[in-house]
Amino acid sequence: MEQIKVMVNGIPGNMAVNVAKHVINDSMFELIPYALTGPEITETEYTLDSTVISLIHPQESDKAIAEIKEKENYFVSVDYSHPSSVNSNAGFYCKYNLPFVMGTTGGDRKLLEDTVCSSSIPAVIAQNMAKQIVGFQAMMEYAAKTFPDLFKGYSLEIKESHQKGKADTSGTAKAMIGYFNDLGTPFSENDITKERDPEVQKNVWGIPEEYLEGHGWHTYTLVSSDKTVRFAFSHNVNGRDVYAKGTLDAVSYIDKKVKAGEKGKVYTMIDVLKGRN
Amino acid sequence: MEQIKVMVNGIPGNMAVNVAKHVINDSMFELIPYALTGPEITETEYTLDSTVISLIHPQESDKAIAEIKEKENYFVSVDYSHPSSVNSNAGFYCKYNLPFVMGTTGGDRKLLEDTVCSSSIPAVIAQNMAKQIVGFQAMMEYAAKTFPDLFKGYSLEIKESHQKGKADTSGTAKAMIGYFNDLGTPFSENDITKERDPEVQKNVWGIPEEYLEGHGWHTYTLVSSDKTVRFAFSHNVNGRDVYAKGTLDAVSYIDKKVKAGEKGKVYTMIDVLKGRN
């Protein structure tokens, strides 16, 4: 079976490095040793195991990509860069006909989609690449549409814990609020209990020490007005491996789309999930 | 608004008595003071608050129902009797054109459905009347159909606790196993951890003492092969009120169907859930 070549952009960011590791360790894929990086990065190389990856800075990217395309021919690009680069990077991939998988959050999402739709490439774009969490969100969306007010009269509690650096509310928790609202439980983003204190995370939540710097734990609890019924849904992710695995599934998916001749189309992780079979 | 008359059969069984209480306490409904009962019951009356309910034994049921229909005219029957009476009771309701809601488990389910389909009445038949649990099962069924193998490679643990008297495995847990199998996690009924010891329920599970004799707690836990991702879904029911409330929603639903002229149709709680809006 032919390996799929992958260029991972956003190195030395945590998530990009993690995906690059998974590419190196999976025989279905081959990492090409170049990576777009941000203007604030001063290094010109990043060494991952025994692979030396050349870091390409914005001002040299046009020249570099021509050489890389000439040398590598076809490959899939993965983008875990920075919210401020979302739209410029998408424009770059479209300009140079580079099919891509983007897990970077932020930016102008509408413009992002429009850019791909008017291009000659397909792309998978998703703010959460963990397939099982995306599947769980789809379940909740189904319930919200099919059984509105199913939990009317129930009280809702949402608790989430993420590494100390994460300033904003979990995007997953925010999406879930919309579904719970449709299911009949009033709730707003301010009602989420956010935990960012490593001491509490370790001692009260029981989050393993090695994951205090990278985790996403969520629990949604529903209690009936007479207190006799209690539902609880949790999804606890330690580290970033699950996102890297989902990203590689998205790479395989977009590779099939490229080979099927699809152009100018944006796919989500729901498409990837459904397309696995 | 006109009250819906309800005859609750299976008194003095726990579930039937509980539904009868809810009928009395809900101004949308009126309890008619008669109840079919089993051949093993020696009492001829059951007093609920200030209502004296005549218990009708099998050998006198044909004569009694003629008098009750003459006196009460139209009413909806609710059946929480015994697995051994499921088919004979359904035959009785169909013979006398009594639209019904049946929460009784067991019996020949195919014959049960056929009996209603060849009759002139509609019926709601469900082995679980707790709307939120039925909705959750529908969510899981949707995921199993839409995203097969979503949890491939994950290990599954199912734990359930019910009152000491319950000999068999939870029907809800059994239904869930099928969905989890489709989602990629091998599991059989024997793998379920069943708790029936009141001391453990109280001290380890934290089930309130007053519900040791009537509860259904379920937890499904999925862990990824690399142990970094953990999902847990719980639904804990104390007492029987949630089932009684669902039963009354089913009564309202079947009343609408009767008034719309529906005949020979079996509805499930999924229909009731969808029909609420």
Image: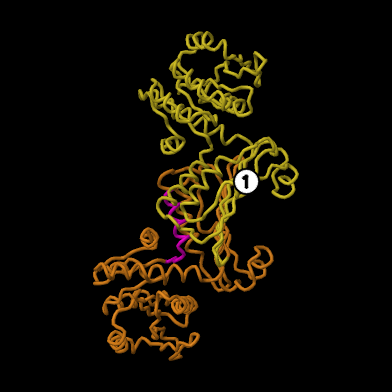
Chain colours: A yellow, B orange
Q: Chain of mark 1?
A: A
Q: Residue at x 62, y 38 (%)?
A: A168
- The amino acid type found where label 1 is placed reads Glu
Q: Residue at x 28, y 67 (%)?
A: B114
Q: Secondary structure at mark 1?
A: strand
Task: Classify A69 as above or below B76.
Answer: above
Magenta highlight on residue A149: no
The residue lying toward the viewer, choosing from B187 and B53, is: B53
Query: Is B99 placed left or right of A86 in the picture?
Result: left
Frontmost residue, B155 versus B190? B155
**Residue A3 in sight in this render:** no
Q: Quadrant of residue B262?
A: bottom left
**Residue B134 included in the magenta stretch of the image:** yes
Residue at numbered disc 1: A160
- Magenta-highlighted residues: B127-142
Residue B243 screen position, x and y as percent: 47, 69
Residue B224: quarter of image:
top right
Whether residue B44 is visible here, answered yes or no, is: yes
Q: Where is residue A124 shown, x and y percent of the image?
A: 46, 29
Percent position of residue A74, x then y: 45, 16
